[in-house]
Image (spheres, grey):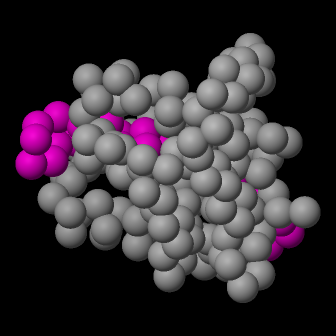
Amino acid sequence: MKKILLIAAALAAFPMLANAKTLAFPSEAPIASVTIPDNWKPQETETGIDANSPDAAIYFALDVASGDNVEKVIGDAVDFLDKNGVKIDASTRKDDDSNEVNGMKMSILNWQGTDADGPVNINLGVLSPAPNKILVLTYWGSKDDQAKHEKEVLDIIGSIKPAK
């Protein structure tokens, strides 16, 4: 069922892709690519890619890690959230290992929390586009904002592919 939803999201994304940028990263030795709408202003960072929805309601990032430093990258993502005023309620953690994106298994860690604007959902996803390479997906936003941007977020996630 989830595969069907991702395929449907990818097909429905066709109009979005006309005004989107496909980024292969890291640029010096790409291991993956992702398509992000231009109005999200995607940019390459030191460790991957990040973007914000046009209304700054949703933050989205993909960071590259090797198999031996994935815990550090996840820790860095949690620290980044903390430095940006996102407080995670650890008691709300839910794990979901049943996802797949373009042939890659994806584990998602989900929490509830708060930021300066109120209650938020926080998601960290982990997937492997190449041997000993891990992508850590981070996004957060309020429940209302996530619902408003759900199609875009699903399209972005559905566009993540291993580099060729």
Secondary structure that dominates the magenta span: strand
Q: Position of residue 90 (x, y in %)?
A: 29, 47
| Residue bounds of the magenta highlight | 109-132
Q: Position of residue 132 (x, y in %)?
A: 79, 73
Work out whether residue 140 can be spotted. Answer: no
Q: Is residue 147 above or below residue 99?
A: above
Work out whether residue 104 can be spotted. Answer: yes
Q: Is residue 64 above or below residue 57?
A: below
Tell me the residue at 26%/23% (across/down): 144
In the rendered image, the quadrant that contains the N terminus is top right
Q: Position of residue 113 (x, y in %)?
A: 22, 41
On the picture, is 91 further left or further right than 115? right
Tell me the residue at 85%/42% (across/down): 103
Tell me the residue at 77%/81% (across/down): 29
Q: Is residue 3 above or below residue 129?
A: above
Which corner quadrant of the image does residue 48 belong to? bottom right
In the depicted view, which residue is nearer to us: 135 or 94?
135
